[in-house]
Amino acid sequence: MRSPVSRGLSRRSLLATLVLGACSRGGAQSPARILALSPLPAGSRLEALGGLELDDGVLGFGGLSALHIDDDLRLTAISDLGHWVTARLALREGRPEGLADLRTGPLRDGSGIPLRRGYGGDAESLARLPDGSWLVGFERWQRIRRYRDISGPGEYVEAPPGLEFAPRNGGLESLAVLPDGRWLAIAESFLPRGDESLRRAWIGGPGAWRRLVYRPAEGFNPADMAPLPGGGALVLERSFSIFAGFGGRVVRLSAAQLNGAVLEGEEILRLDAPVPRDNYEGITVFRHAGRTLVALVSDDNENMLQRTLLLVFAVVDE
């Protein structure tokens, strides 16, 4: 979802000038620079390992809205501007050092034609199927496409019942494929029966969807989700107000909770100082060197006052 600040100052022209200047000198540009993170308070459920600030000028776009990193450290992300990016995440002792083998391109429709920015290309959620193909959830035009290759054509799959009635910018921000094969989907601001404390959710998959509801913290909306290797999921929630700016938190849903009718997670991370505050929209979980790592990515809304940040944490209470 594009936040209210997306109507602010665009930095596209500024970045284009900087990139053209660098290219004219023949210098190679790095897609990311290292961002140090301060330690989290004692007793935190996660350990801050470090981060990267991504360069939209090198990527060619911003607006990253969903993230996946596999156990081989291959990163895949999508933009709500209708694009994808893949890269290899370089880690040293779990701490991010950069991105390599960067590739980008447009998301495509079923005929292979690039999706246009806006109504047709507002990609907001990403999930990996066991066969290696991808599920991408879209807002505005509420739907799910399956991509056998993220760079190829995307076919329609059966979306959760009633999703077509979701608010224009309140659809599938959160989509995950659980270890048991079920799909879990949560709408950002689609309220059941007008209850502002709940969001519509579904579990199952095509031909087997079952309705649930999700309860975020007051003032927050679900922004993305990632399955946990042992079952359950992490949900990224986001808040925004003119006076307080962006807020966020990460909550854990247990495997047992996913069998209930109301999903309500346990907070394990608050995205506030010392964590840099921004518009975090993507979350992923992966294994590396015997540890479970969690990564977040922020959507800069193409606003020069925001950044595209990739933060990496380790779970400490396994």
Image (cartoon, rainbow, N blue to C red):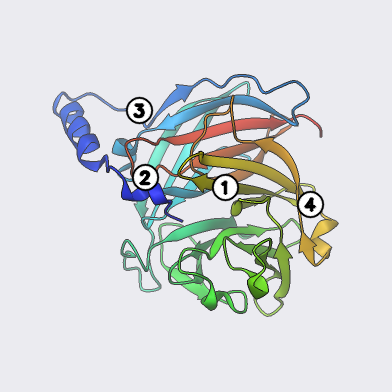
Q: Residue at x 69, y 30 (%)?
A: 314
As drawn, is 94 to the left or to the right of 23?
right
Up the image or down, 117 lies above or below 8; here it is below
Whole-angstrom CA distance, mark 4 to mark 2, is 32 Å
**x, y percentage for residue 185?**
64, 64
| Secondary element type, mark 3 | loop
Q: Tell me the residue at 57%/37% (across/down).
A: 73
Looking at the rendered structure, which numbered label has been put on residue 30? 3
Question: Is residue 68 among what the camera can see?
Answer: no
SS for callout 4: loop
Q: Residue 265: in sight, yes or no?
A: yes
Of circles 1 and 4, the one toward us is 1
Per the image, the residue denoted by label 2 is 62
| Three-letter code for the amino acid on which mark 1 is drawn | Arg
Spot occupied by residue 151 in the image (x, y as percentages of width and height) = 41, 57
Instruction: Give the number of the mark in front: 2 or 3.
Output: 2
* Mark 1 vs mark 2: in front: 1
259 to 163, vertically: above or below: above
First-in-chain label (1 vs 2) = 2
* Number of on-image labels: 4
Q: Which residue is mark 4?
A: 231
Up the image or down, 150 lies above or below 54; here it is below
Label 2's element?
Answer: loop
Query: On the rendered image, what quadrant is the C terminus found in?
Result: top right
Circle 4 Cα neighbour tier, 10 Å, few/some/many (<14 / 14–19 / ≥20)? some
Q: Earlier in the sequence, mark 3 or mark 1?
A: 3
What kind of residue is marked 4? Answer: Gly
Discs 4/2, front: 2
Counting from the top left corner in percent of width and height, residue 169 is at 47, 63
